[in-house]
Image: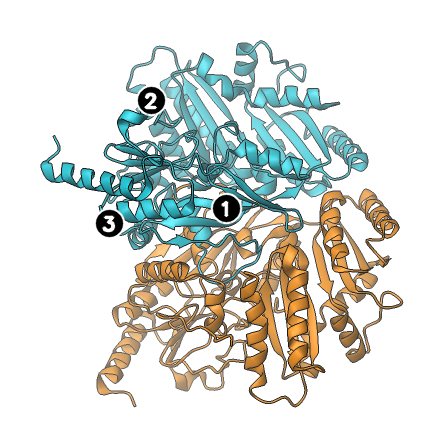
Chain colours: A cyan, B orange
Amino acid sequence: MQDQAEEARREAVLAALREALGAAVVSLPADFAGRRHADSSRMPCAEPIALLRPRTTEQVSKALSICHAHHQPVVTQGGLTGLAGGACMLGGEVALSLELMNAIEEIDPVSATMTVQAGTPLQTVQEAADAAGFMFPLDLGARGSATIGGNLGTNAGGNRVIRYGMMREQALDVEAVLADGSVVGGLRKMIKNNTGYDLRDLLIGSEGTLGVMTRAVLRLRPKPRAVSTAWCGLPDYDSVTTLLRLAQERLPAGVSAFEVMWPGYYDFVLSRLPELRAPLEGRHAFYVLLESSGADPQSQNDVFEAFLADMLEAGTLSDAALAANEAHAAAFWAIRDAPGEYGRFIPGRVSFDVSFSVAQVGLAAQRCEARLREHWPNATILIYGHLGDGNLHIVVHEPDWPASAAAEVKRVVYGVTGELGGSVSAEHGIGTKKLEVLALSRTPAELAAMRAVKAALDPRGILNPGKLFLESTPTMQLK
Amino acid sequence: MQDQAEEARREAVLAALREALGAAVVSLPADFAGRRHADSSRMPCAEPIALLRPRTTEQVSKALSICHAHHQPVVTQGGLTGLAGGACMLGGEVALSLELMNAIEEIDPVSATMTVQAGTPLQTVQEAADAAGFMFPLDLGARGSATIGGNLGTNAGGNRVIRYGMMREQALDVEAVLADGSVVGGLRKMIKNNTGYDLRDLLIGSEGTLGVMTRAVLRLRPKPRAVSTAWCGLPDYDSVTTLLRLAQERLPAGVSAFEVMWPGYYDFVLSRLPELRAPLEGRHAFYVLLESSGADPQSQNDVFEAFLADMLEAGTLSDAALAANEAHAAAFWAIRDAPGEYGRFIPGRVSFDVSFSVAQVGLAAQRCEARLREHWPNATILIYGHLGDGNLHIVVHEPDWPASAAAEVKRVVYGVTGELGGSVSAEHGIGTKKLEVLALSRTPAELAAMRAVKAALDPRGILNPGKLFLESTPTMQLK
């Protein structure tokens, strides 16, 4: 039960917000009944005490300075597609949605930049870049609803990291409102700017705990004029890393995707999704979707085909199918994109997004699978990932297992991740979902440094409290 | 005059350092007479009260925890090639040189990483990468003496930023000792790692004010197998940006260098350095050194040549010379690398390292030159830069001008930089040399956020005090 002082504090902050920003910006629970507040993490999520939908950076600044003055916790929300619970509310927070700050303010074709407001959906940015003759390379399944602000908040990754990097490498500058309402970042378009600490990269990936990003200058890339795609079968893991290295060395346009699938994944998705067709005959120890995207259609495909022939000759590849057209390539990608359909056929799954050095990905997968099999010999274990980035996705499922199994599965996979010095979150972030495993990837000194930075920039702890790390971060017991 | 308490404090800290680390690590002024302490900034630089040369991260940790306990300022030194005075001493500091931590600890060819100690010279890293079949792309004139630690501390740039990014993009992880002696960074080799704040990018470019970087995991790249180089003459600035954009779009291997030279620069260096030869006949409004480095020698040169022919046909290029061999390419680069010889023929120059959006580089150069000409109609004004990065170098010189002229020249160039929202330091950092102009590129709110981060991680202010920003950063008076 809330005490009277807390009730009075809440009333005061809501009154101050209404007074400063008006009812068009500040909605109370009665106004937003039925609205979804949870993200895509399947974590429990409370209702906010108010919903703010500012239209300008100045309004965000006013909102935060009021919340700061009243010690009022704030959760920033983008498209609610996060997978770690970072945008979920724990109770008592104000939700700050950037959904009405969704304009593309400028495209500068000479500087190859786009200045956008944080609530702009990723797909809108991709389409605007395309229309202007460029590419915005960040891409992920939730592109239609995920926003640039959310992509920035989580330092989003996706399918093209191997070539273009994560979200930090897509933004030249970000404008953000800090906890006290002060505004940093000047929408600068410089690629080189060594004038002090990298506040941009500090804010990107901070999951709403250090500031509210309101606008960004995004970097646009030349639009690829040719895409070469192959589906490869390989005899062993060493061949997989050899193929990666040689493709990076020899393909003129480099490697724009290198997606590895273990046979358990391949067999499972082909058996469950009848619309998928096997690109190769027979079974292989590993499958790789290899893509090279570049500027010169004439020469690129010839070199790509010759490279595959060399790799077959050398035995690095057991078999390979070259996509003859876009429809073929789409059919290959459909196999890799099957996880978008998991909701339909493995609802009770436990999923992981971990990373390792490229050299240790094979060992990590092998060790996870072997230990999981000790406990659950018949479980469905799906392993696949962005090998060029060392990023492994592991999905584990067994029908009718007890409620305690999920915790046990996590102990196994995160245990291996810790042993091999991997990361418990390659691209999804920590949110609330991975709080208990953060200490497997970060040392006490690093957590202390993060807490010091947090206390310096948000001394009252109003920004997304309880996310990313806690005053004393709990640690999963591995035994 | 120092008071007795200060004298006693110094004696105590030196005794504690000697006691903990031994005389082999801790040298006193009598031991290092004649040693150079200044960097390459031509700033005045004091002598340290002691010189520490640790061999391990543990020794760095011990040293900092003692200095922290005794409120003893510390200046970290790499190869002393910095151009902003970041490694200069103001008086009373301990110098911490990483010169004995210069081992390459591991090359992991599968993960394409190199783990090195911070004192390793850049050139040693480049050569080791090359010997292992890779490339380490960071490159700059001082490669023989500049160290990886210094490159990290200043977020070094150089000639290949357009293709590979600055130092932040070359390091997967850094190990650093914080002011209190705690060690952060785990020498992790993951490309994707979304587990909290980006301490790595916060430390990189912090110019020794947040921590002492001791080791790093560097990212290695595929070695280019073919380099295509051309020297281009262009009719106007629009043609320069058009050439950049189309080269990025159409060259299969992308653009690995795009160095622009204004005719004043070109004429001057050719007239002063008799070993240089003009690659083209006649004069042009702009000169561009265009380079594309890739994987496929066969197709790359053909496409490169065809691209140049198209550009000549379209009038984007007035003339172009294709390097037929490495000696030709080296002769082109010698024109661009002439600034390495400035010491010989323009000792009294005033130099700038500023950046703008790519779209505004032309305007910035024009405006700087016009305003400088108003004051000094006969001055030597050299303008050139890495256009793909928006980075402009401007050098101004007039024989026999008064001592006050340098300050006036700075007011003109930094004035234009501030007006156009550019950066007063594209790649050299702030150090002490650019303290007075930092506020032209950073807002008060940003400086306040930087100070808060500094106070959080170095509460006693022992790390490189007086560098990068001050408690109250002074601002150049532009009028």
Residue that protrudes farthest toward the left in the picture: A4
Identify the element where label 2 is drawn: helix
Q: Residues within 10 Å of mark 2 (few under 14, many from 20)?
A: some
Please tell me which residue is depicted at 72% across the width and 72% down the height of the picture.
B338
Quarter holding the N terminus of chain B? bottom left
Distance between mark 1 and mark 2 Cα atoms: 39 Å
- SS class, disc 3: helix
Q: Nearer the viewer, residue B433 or B236?
A: B236
Which of the numbered marks, if any, corresponds to residue A406?
A: 2
Q: Nearer the viewer, residue B370 or A388?
A: B370
Amino acid carrying label 3: it is: Ala
Q: Nearer the viewer, mark 3 or mark 1?
A: 3
To which residue does mark 1 refer? A216
3 and 1 marks in contact (CB < 8 Å): no
Question: Mark 1–mark 2 contact, CB under 8 Å?
Answer: no
How far apart, in angstroms, are the residues tagged by discs 3 and 1? 27 Å
Residue occupying image coordinates x 46% and y 72%:
B435
Q: Position of residue A470 (x, y in %)?
A: 27, 42
What's the amino acid at mark 1? Answer: Ala
Same chain check for tags 3 and 2: yes
Q: Are marks 1 and 2 on the same chain?
A: yes
Q: Is residue B189 above or below residue A330?
A: below
Badges 3 and 1, same chain: yes
Q: Is residue B96 above or below residue B317?
A: below
Q: Is A194 left or right of A129, judged from the image as shown? A: left
Which numbered disc flags the more N-terminal residue, 3 or 1? Answer: 3
- Residue located 57% across and 28% down the image: A260
- The residue pinned by badge 3 equals A69
- Mark 2 belongs to which amino acid? Ala
Mark 1 residue element: strand
Mark 3 closeness class: few <14, some 14–19, many ≥20 residues within 10 Å: some
